[in-house]
Image (cartoon, rainbow, N blue to C red):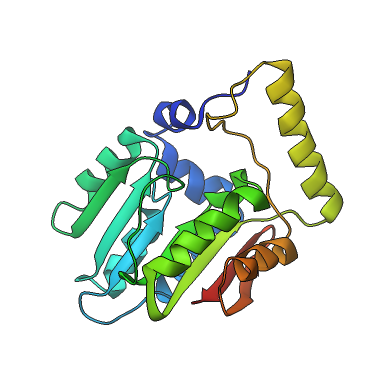
Amino acid sequence: MIEKMDDFFTARVNGYDRHMKSNIEGADSFYRYTASLLPTEDRANVLDLGCGTGLELEEYFAVNPNARVTGIDLTKAMLDALKFKFPDKEIITVCGSYFAVPFGVEVFDAAVSVESLHHFSKEEKIPLYTKLRNALKPGGYFILTDYFAELNEQEVFFRQELLRIRQEQKLPNDVFYHYDTPLTVEHEKETLLEAGFSQVNEIERWEVTHTLKAVR
């Protein structure tokens, strides 16, 4: 039985940071690299999608200690750990789905997401990315560091497997379950462009983890 997304991360919150840093290829550097791409201006306003316990924020606050961050995550336990970790930082936490939470219009200087969005299809992401683009100020950008499928065949297989499991286990369509369905890098780029971003480039990679920059 695959687990609900919230239940999966709630059960693993205590060892989450250690697991991510020690078990994912490149994690010892990609959190730092991702943070280095975010705005350095004093009190820059940044949106973090699927912020978890804030591994990328540890690195970002080291670069920009006065940044203002809005972190959205499904899991309250993760957000509690984040707030405990950064008691002196200007962080707004929102417990909910980033598909449902309003972002506002031209609010953020930049947005970031690390190892969160590989659970969703192109069709699910286009409205999310459209909303995200609209939430960025002119000249704003989105940094996505995530797990991607290497081949189109992998992408199709993962998606079909999730649909098969959902049908087999009679899982409701309106609940998020923890199962990886990464797109290929090319399909992720297409998705961001279809959502209205003007330019999308891959700028770094570590095995199956890649960093993309999408400019409003």
Left or right, 174 with reference to 140: right
x, y percentage for residue 134? 43, 68
> Would residue 215 be seen by someone viewing this image from the given angle?
yes
Rendered view: 45 above or below 96: below
- Residue at coordinates 66% horizontally, 16% vertically from top-left? 170
Hey, which residue is sitting farthest right in the picture?
153
Q: Residue 205 at what x, y percent from top left?
A: 64, 68
In what quadrant of the picture does the N terminus appear? top right
Identify the residue shown where x is 57% and y is 80%.
Answer: 198
Task: Name which quarter of the figure residue 67 lies in.
Answer: bottom left
211 relative to 83, above or below: below
Residue 53 in sight from this viewpoint: no
- Residue, x 32% and y 33% (percent of image)? 77
Q: Is residue 101 left or right of residue 133?
A: left
Residue 175: where, in percent of width, then height?
52, 29
> As drawn, which residue projects farthest toward the left?
88
